[in-house]
Amino acid sequence: MSDTSVPQSPVANAIDRLARAFGAAGIAVFACMIVYVVICRYVFSFTPRWSEEIPRLLLIWVTFVGAVSAFIRGTHLCAGLTDLMVAPGRFRKVLSVLAHLATFLFLAVVFWSGWKITVLTWSHETTVMSWPAGLVYLALPVTAVFAFVALAFAELRK
């Protein structure tokens, strides 16, 4: 998985563009919120009641959406030991296939466990905003589905 080029699948490319746009907008909104909270706290001596919950929720979603783009581009941190220890050839290709299968299995586990905890916590409310607590955990199954679909289309193009 050391290939860092963007896949040639139109579906994977569209998901990657969407994830990057959402991530960029989320980080911009997050930064503006934090600046606003700091100004309110230190200049006006008051803290907005949402100053912890909404930025935390946004940070979690931006992180997982960024992971989708990293999955698609193959830019997650990797040691690269396979390339150093295994000569190019059939065995390296087998290891690559096993790594891709492990990735799909991992995404299936993230989806299933994320969905279970989302359903379990949806009826609970956050302390300040009274939003469903499951919104935090919903990032897991949603981003797992996008990553799974994008990687599947990228693999089908190979």
Image: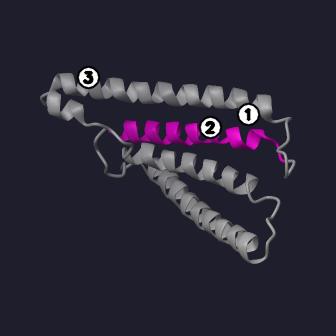
Does 57 sit left or right of 75 as displayed? right
Q: Amino acid at mark 2?
A: Leu
Q: Amino acid at mark 3?
A: Val
Per the model, the C-alpha gap separating discs 1 and 3 is 36 Å
Q: Secondary structure at mark 1?
A: helix
Q: Which range is magenta?
A: 131-158
Q: Amino acid at mark 1?
A: Thr
Q: To which residue does mark 2 refer?
A: 140
Does 95 sit left or right of 67 as displayed? left
Give the tally of numbered discs.
3
In the picture, which quadrant includes the C terminus? top left
Q: Is residue 152 above or below residue 44?
A: above
Q: List x then y, in percent, for residue 67.
A: 49, 45
Q: List x then y, in percent, for residue 31.
A: 61, 67
Sequence-earlier tag: 2 or 3 = 3
Q: To which residue does mark 1 refer?
A: 118
Other residues around mark 3 within 10 Å, as few (<14) / some (14–19) / many (≥20): few
